[in-house]
Amino acid sequence: MRAKSQYPLSLKLILIGIFILFLVFLILKSTLSSSHQNLSSVLSAKTTTTTCPPIPLSTQACDKIPPSLSQALVHYATSNITPQQTFKEISVTLRVLEKKSPCNFLVFGLGHDSLMWTSLNHGGRTVFLEEDKSWIQQIMLKLPKLEAYHVVYDTKRTQADELLKVGMEEDCRVVGDPRFSKCALALKGFPSEIYDVEWDLIMVDAPTGYFDGAPGRMSAIYTAGLMSRNRESGETDVFVHDVDRVVEDKFSKTFLCEGYLREQEGRIRHFTIPSHRTRLGRPWEAGKGLVEAAEQPIHEPNMDNGQRMA
């Protein structure tokens, strides 16, 4: 009888246990669900707050150093030879290049400063005219990307007095293509492309002019002035180096015109010569005292000091 009376109690306890377990399950399920939601919210919020916005592309281009500039830096950093012009003299031309580059730049002479001029006119065209063929080969072996041409001069520095008088003749005051000029000072033997280009800058630092047997720069200075006047429009900046010498001094003042002189620093002069084709009536504007200069003989000592000079 006792066993019978305990059965319902056992069943009751079992049912209560099952209920309790079910209740615990519901509670745990609710808790886990809530925790999962909270965790999802936290993770979602964390993801939202930690996600970095896309990095905008830089508006500044990161370009490499142009090859010509790299070559110039290495060349001058590893060379014991420096350009013949001083820093202040170089700065005269540099200031013009900073305004006009890239441009067309014609240089009479090829030397240790040639790579510098090409680099300072990056993106433009820089051409060198040199009288010494072996010197061209020597420089081009080291700097093959330079554009240089061999040219021949048929004058001697001892002819400077005579050529200064020739420059006063009417044929030498006619503006036109040097190839067709009747003036004995005009250089006609350059490569044709030299005459076909309008040069924005011209530098006369050659041919050789420091001893009597040298060609002298009489024709180079005159031709630089003629080419500048013959351009279609605008103006040409002309630089003459070694104006401490009599020939360069007199011929630059006479044929580039003192009225067009902009600056002199040390041994270099800077002239700005306008086109004469846009104003057909514009006079040649020969320098002051042309007749007096032609009547005064040019006496200049030889300056051969054993180094290559121009």
Image: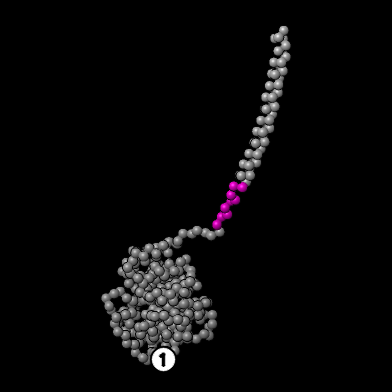
Decide which of 21, 42 is in the foreground and name it.
21
Q: Position of residue 72 (x, y in %)?
A: 39, 65
Closer to the camera in the image, 34 or 228: 34
Q: Residue at x 53, y 60 (%)?
A: 60
Q: Is residue 209 magenta?
A: no
Residue 187 visible: no
Q: Main secondary structure of the magenta part?
A: loop
- Element carrying mark 1: helix
Where, quadrant-wise, is the C terminus in this rendering? bottom left
Quadrant that contains the N terminus:
top right
Up-down relation of residue 197 to residue 68 (above or below): below
Q: Residue furthest left?
A: 306
Q: Position of residue 18 (x, y in %)?
A: 69, 22
- Most extreme residue toward the front is 2
Does the magenta portion include 56? yes
Quick check: can you spot residue 45? yes
Amino acid at pointer 1:
Val
Q: Residue at x 60, y 51 (%)?
A: 53
Q: Is residue 291 above or below residue 20?
A: below
Name of the residue lying farthest toward the top: 1
Q: Which residue corresponds to mark 1?
A: 291
Quadrant in the rendering for residue 37: top right
Q: Tell whether 121 sits left or right of 56.
A: left
Magenta segment, which residues? 49-58
Residue at the location (68% across, 21% down)?
17
| Residue 75 locus on image (x, y percent) | 36, 64
